[in-house]
Image (spheres, helix red, strand yellow):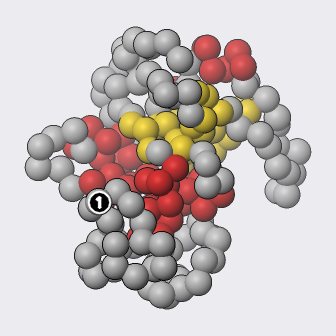
Amino acid sequence: MTEQPAHLDNQPLNELEEQLARGEQPDANPVDVILAFLNNEVYVVSSDALEGPDSQVEPLVLANSSGKPVLAVFSHPSRVTEQYLAAAPNVLGTQGAAIIGNLGAELGMVINPGAAFGFEIDPEGVANIRRDFKPTDEPADGAAAQPTGGAVDRPAQDGGPAQDGGPAQDGGPA
């Protein structure tokens, strides 16, 4: 993937982008950024159009600088540049929690590729978010339920997100 110029519009367009901008500050709380992503509408692009409520689409997957696959996700429809629309002309909105809940184990995610407000999460980071952040209507010890589109709450206060970057294999301490 080649280096891309930053998006010309550096003004946040919604709550998620405001949190992404704050997330770059030294005193930022990454939990706030994650919650904003999970609880807000985000956009993927696809060559497939939604035909009905049960339609499935294949969203655009890019390769990161290491050649690993990452799902392209956008915080606002205007962040989708022409180069992505040429490959996948349909912009589809969904909850961030639904994206995290449906990503495969080998797929990372890039938010706003090439834009001012964005970041990349590797597959291990996606798994950590899935493990540590639960919808507010799901018990803290809840079995792996699919996100319902409801609000997602802060992680349990048993240490929060893994600080070593690696999930515990047995669900115990890392």
- Position in image of residue 90 (x %, y %): 73, 30
- Position in image of residue 124 (x %, y %): 47, 54
Is residue 85 rendered to the left or right of residue 117? right
Is residue 50 rendered to the left or right of residue 28? right
Q: Amino acid at mark 1?
A: Asp
Nearer to me, 108 or 30:
108
Nearer to me, 105 or 140:
105
Residue 124 appears in the picture as rendered:
yes
Q: Residue furthest right?
A: 51
Residue 152 appears in the picture as rendered:
no
- Position in image of residue 159 (x %, y %): 26, 76
- Position in image of residue 161 (x %, y %): 32, 66
For label 1, count other residues whose C-alpha is less than 10 Å away and answer few (under 14), some (14-19) or many (20+): few
Residue at 36% in and 47% down: 15
Is residue 89 rendered to the left or right of residue 141? right
Compared with residue 7, is residue 19 higher up or lower down, i.e. above or below?
Answer: below
Nearer to me, 102 or 172:
172
Residue at 24% in and 44% down: 23
Residue at 44% in and 13% down: 4
Which of the 4 image quadrants contains residue 25?
Answer: top left
Q: Which quarter shows the C terminus?
A: bottom left
Which of the 4 image quadrants contains residue 10?
Answer: top left
- Disc 1 secondary structure class: loop
Compared with residue 121, is residue 124 higher up or lower down, i.e. above or below?
Answer: below
Residue at 42% in and 72% down: 168
Is residue 25 rendered to the left or right of residue 23? left
Q: Residue furthest left?
A: 27
Compared with residue 32, is residue 152 higher up or lower down, i.e. above or below?
Answer: below
Which of the 4 image quadrants contains residue 45?
Answer: top right
Residue at the spot of label 1: 164
